[in-house]
Image (cartoon, grey):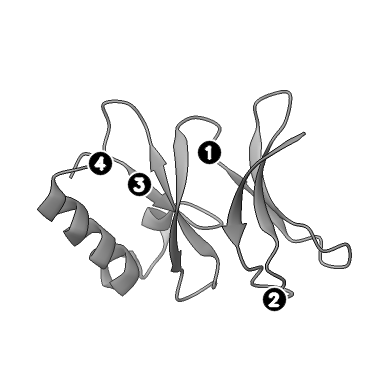
Amino acid sequence: MRKIIFIGECPKCGADELNLYKTKAYKRFIKCESETCKFSYAVPKAGKIENTTLLCPNTKVPILLVFKKDKTSYFWTDRPCFTCIDYTQCSEVNCLINEFKELKVNGY
């Protein structure tokens, strides 16, 4: 298991220790480094992942941007953002989408 990038603060324990990891089987997940917390969740196996530094208003998990070649990028928290009931009203995601449309990047 190899640490790839720092993601942000853990929503469960508040420690500033969420990191992205990749296993030898190329599976990826986010995990809190605190020994008492054990907070973790899976992220997509394919695609480049970048941290947007914004937090999901519902779960307080950092919003990640997933890039796939020749496809529109999408957002991920502890699940795909587009599966959230509040996706169309999410101010953070809408702000990012508007910014990408203005810059004409990430497939928007």
Tag 4's secondary structure?
A: loop
In contact (CB < 8 Å): disc 4 and disc 1: no
Toward which corner of the image does residue 85 lie, by quadrant?
bottom left
Q: Nearer the viewer, mark 1 or mark 2?
A: 2
Q: Could you tell me which residue is drawn at 33 percent across and 69 percent down? A: 92
Q: Mark 3 points at which residue?
A: 74
Q: Which of marks 2 and 3 is in front?
A: 2
Residue 52 screen position, x and y as percent: 41, 57
Q: Could you tell me which residue is drawn at 50 percent across and 58 percent down? A: 77
Q: Could you tell me which residue is drawn at 47 percent across and 41 percent down? A: 49
Residue 69 screen position, x and y as percent: 32, 26
In screen coordinates, is 21 left or right of 36? left
Q: Could you tell me which residue is drawn at 54 percent across and 71 percent down? A: 59
Q: Could you tell me the amino acid type at mark 4?
A: Asn
Q: Could you tell me the amino acid type at mark 2?
A: Gly
Q: Name the residue under label 2.
A: 14
Mark nearer the N terminus (4 vs 2): 2
Tag 1's secondary structure?
A: loop
Disc assigned to residue 106: 4
Using the numbered discs, state the Cα–Cα distance from disc 1 to disc 3 in whole angstroms: 11 Å
In contact (CB < 8 Å): disc 2 and disc 3: no
Disc assigned to residue 44: 1
Q: Is residue 14 above or below residue 62?
A: below
